[in-house]
Amino acid sequence: MDGDSLGDGSPGFGARAGWTREQAGGIERTADTVAPVFYPPEHDQVPEVHIWDTWFLRNRDGTLAEVDGYRVCFSLTAPADLLPGKRHDVATIRAFYSDDGRNWHNAGPVFDEALGQRQWAGSALYDDGDVYVFYTAAGEDGADELTYTQRIVGASGGTIHTGDGFELHGPWTHHDLLRPDGERYEREEQSRGMIYTFRDPWFFEDPATGETWLLFEANTPVPEGSDACGGDAAQQEFNGSVGLARSPTGDPLEWELADPLLDAVCVNQELERPHIVYTDGLYYLFVSSHQHTFAPGLEGFDALYGFVAEDLRGEYVPLNDSGLVVTNPVNAPFQAYSWMAFPHDDEVLVQSFFNYFDFAGASLDEIAHLPEAEQMRRFGGTLGPTVRLDAEGARTRILGKLGHWQIPRAGESLPPTDRELIARGQAGETDRYHSSD
Ligand code: FRU
């Protein structure tokens, strides 16, 4: 790929790069960005819990770890009899393991005790036999009421034993790693708008430089009276950013805040679960975001959005001009959320959780108005089908999908895509590729 064709990124508001209203104004569903409809899996692999945000145990170089033949993932979970809308208040990190990348087993809660009132999303590193879990401590420890403060924590001390089946053990030590500084990263009390964020740490060792980084979701302080968005106070409340910290020594427990990689001031409030796929010498930065977190005057979807640059701290250009990479079909607009991409051969695979299916309401808020039994029935609460993506410079296109929670081993060859079968005239042998109907 010739990097010159990426074009120039837009400067951010205090961040190195920015997602502009003009770019986000171009968001629209296309055949290349709309995922196929997801149907419920034939059987729920882990029926006892709701599963949502999920991340895989990865090696320092970003590849998926395989420990004595096991792939391991971590998910936010809650008891399956809980109303799905209440799950964020009790989120617990559980580990799951698989020896074939299709059938996953519950290894139970990772921690006996953790920091915060509940634990939100993160990432996990397998480093020379040691397991580190980075997560968000949400809520003030010890407070009677639920609170929404967030800080970034790292747990060390994990080891995996496979002699007698799979076991992940502590004893864990929980380290407070990062809190917002109030300058580059907004503190909760500075927040002027909806849904404050300082969360979702994601470990990344840059293969090109060997430097060690932690990405996270944050907000950029925008003081009242600022001239951002032409002084439009309502738009200024939307100030999502992708935060960055550096480990000067490579120690996964020692971090210094750096300038944000990208912001979406005047565009979007939540750039969730930021992560990088490094491929073809390019840095693909992905985030998840919601329809309802776009600033007034912009229309987006619950979707995976992405940007590409030639350096980690480079001039990010939105993928496909607008930033939209994978969204849900118009007739199932909330079928999946919290996407996470990872490289596989010359493709990029994207896992997400199966959210509300059989629901074509105008917003997620409408779910809460359905009878409770319907809210339960329509919530997937497991991993969705893995989506296959082609990324070429600043363009991506969806190639098809694999099964629910199907995570192939490195080097495992994938079946021909539906598009390939159609090109060969064998479309009848599989479901026809689903476009943006
Ligand atoms: C995305 C998210 C994450 C957060 C978690 C809380 O699905 O909002 O940013 O860590 O959910 O449940």
Image: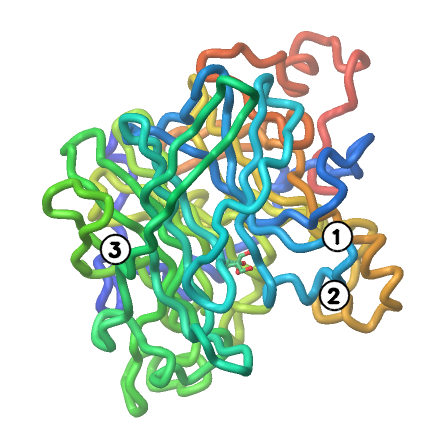
Residue 34 image-quadrant placement: top right
Q: What is the x, y in percent for residue 63?
A: 37, 26
Q: Secondary structure at mark 3?
A: strand
Q: Name the mark nearer the viewer: 1 or 3.
A: 1
Camera-side residue of 355 and 166: 166
> What colour-coding does the image apply?
rainbow
Do residues under tags 2 and 3 come within 8 Å of each other at their CB atoms? no
Question: In the image, is 391 to the left or to the right of 379?
Answer: left
Q: Secondary structure at mark 2?
A: loop
Question: In the image, is 70 to the left or to the right of 86?
Answer: left
**Within 10 angstroms of label 3, few (less than 14), some, or many (20 or more) residues?**
many
Camera-side residue of 282 and 299: 282
For the residues labelled 2 and 1, the Cα–Cα distance comes to 26 Å
Q: Amino acid at mark 1?
A: Ala
The residue indicated by pointer 2 is: 362
Q: What is the x, y in percent for residue 84?
A: 72, 60
The residue indicated by pointer 3 is: 244
Quick check: is the Cβ at mark 3 less than 8 Å away from ligand 1? no
Q: Name the mark nearer the viewer: 2 or 3.
A: 3
Image quadrant occupied by the N terminus? top left
Q: Earlier in the sequence, mark 2 or mark 1?
A: 1
Q: Is residue 398 above or below residue 291?
A: above
Is residue 119 visible in the rendered image? The answer is yes
For the residues labelled 2 and 3, the Cα–Cα distance comes to 34 Å
Q: Earlier in the sequence, mark 1 or mark 3?
A: 1
Q: What is the x, y in percent for residue 390?
A: 48, 27
Q: Amino acid at mark 3?
A: Leu
